[in-house]
Image: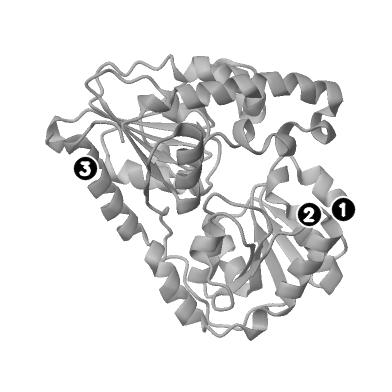
Amino acid sequence: MHRATQRVVLIHDWLTGMRGGEKVLESLCRLYPDADLLTLVHVPGSVTPVIEHRRVRASIINRLPAPARWYRHYLPLFPFAIEQFDLDDATLVVSTSHCAAKAVVPTGRAVHVCYSHSPMRYAWDQFPAYFGPDRLGHLGSAAARHVVAWLARWDRDTAPRVNRFIANSAYVAGRIRRYYNRRAAVLHPPVDTGFFTPGHGAPGDYFLVVSALVPYKRIDTAIRAAALLGARLKIVGTGPDADRLRAIAATGTEFLGHVDDGELRDLYRGARALVLPGEEDFGIAPVEAQACGRPVVALARGGACETVEHGVSGWLVEPGSTDAASDASRFADAMRLVDTLPLSPAELHTRACAFSGERFDAGLTHLVAEALEHPQAW
């Protein structure tokens, strides 16, 4: 199908801030400048102008009380809301999904390509981190389990609405295979390696965390590891776990909240290393840190194993027991060794260029063209 004849619609879970998923959406907006953008929740001004200047259509969730603050509490309504979008005139639907966007209902003539950041995490394998008894109490957790089990079935049953899955990592492709019984091509997300570049001065004396402050990110492990070292730690990000993390933070831990891209680049450049204590589906921060010439200390699980080379561009810490003190000790040991890694800042930047925006755009264009040429589901 010739691109000029296409009616393209982009679908994204929610527009409430710039994270790794929104970097992918930004690239899609450039590739499809005339496409409409559909989303469950839109907080005006929360994303870059490239995204904000789209024709944005938000779901009924956006009309509920305080959607910017409470949208996660409306989770049981997401299936109904996403299925209400009218896609009758679409010939190509491109969704970027870690929750519900992949479950839109296109017409039979539309080809649906889903760039998947992950099957719904809390529905499949991270229920305790989001809805466990320590978060909701025993009664609340028991009630949530029934809702989340229903969401898992819905997430699985709506996978056939996608013609072609593209996973943001080999790790996520494995999850798509396990939970949806579908194949997925792998295309890592884009990183602006022209903007994230090494600085000219020597790094500072602090370690850095760049993450949403949610339980499964395990930011508490980084806080405890820094305390064991007596090292300074700067934490960039916001989220519902902020108060708990502040309560356990030692002197020398600084919560910076949201920062703009220029500030973030300066923080990467000045850090001894980025610390990534949680299991990420891909994890864009380790690539941005390496693009800025700084090494990474990460959990040896998930997407970090595809972006960090152990003993070369960083240290991968093997997961151990559920004992928090033991985990913190292993991370502290690796953080202590970051200055012994062999690569220069320029060499780290060169490695990060394998994740450039140009590579992403070319890969996505090829995979979408392939799906249009052969629309039958994998």
Q: Mark 1 near mark 2, Cβ–Cβ under 8 Å?
A: yes
Total numbered badges shown on the rendered structure: 3
What residue type is disc 3 on? Glu
Q: Residues within 10 Å of mark 1 (few under 14, many from 20)?
A: few
Q: Secondary structure at mark 1?
A: helix
Quadrant of the frame with the C terminus = top left
Cα gap from disc 2 to disc 3, whole angstroms: 43 Å
Mark positioned earlier in the residue sequence (2 or 3):
2
Mark positioned earlier in the residue sequence (3 or 1):
1
The foreground one among 48 and 345 is: 345
- Quarter-of-image position of residue 210: bottom right
Q: Mark 2 near mark 3, Cβ–Cβ under 8 Å?
A: no
- Quarter-of-image position of residue 49: top left
Residue at image point 53% right, 71% down: 309
Work out whether 198 lies above or below 181: below
Q: Position of residue 167 (x, y in %)?
A: 42, 45
Cα gap from disc 3 to disc 1, whole angstroms: 50 Å
Question: Which labelled disc corresponds to residue 90?
Answer: none
Q: Position of residue 366 (x, y in %)?
A: 23, 49
Q: Nearer the viewer, mark 3 or mark 1?
A: 3
Q: Which residue is mark 1?
A: 248
User: Horizontally, is 253 left or right of 189 in the view?
Assistant: right
Q: Which residue is mark 3?
A: 370
Question: Which labelled disc corresponds to residue 220?
Answer: 2
Q: Is residue 287 something one can see in this rendering?
A: no
Q: Residues within 10 Å of mark 2 (few under 14, many from 20)?
A: many
Q: Secondary structure at mark 3?
A: helix
Work out whether 263 lies above or below 309: above
What residue type is disc 1 on? Ile
Q: Position of residue 348 (x, y in %)?
A: 49, 76
Residue at image point 67% right, 54% down: 278
Q: Mark 3 near mark 1, Cβ–Cβ under 8 Å?
A: no
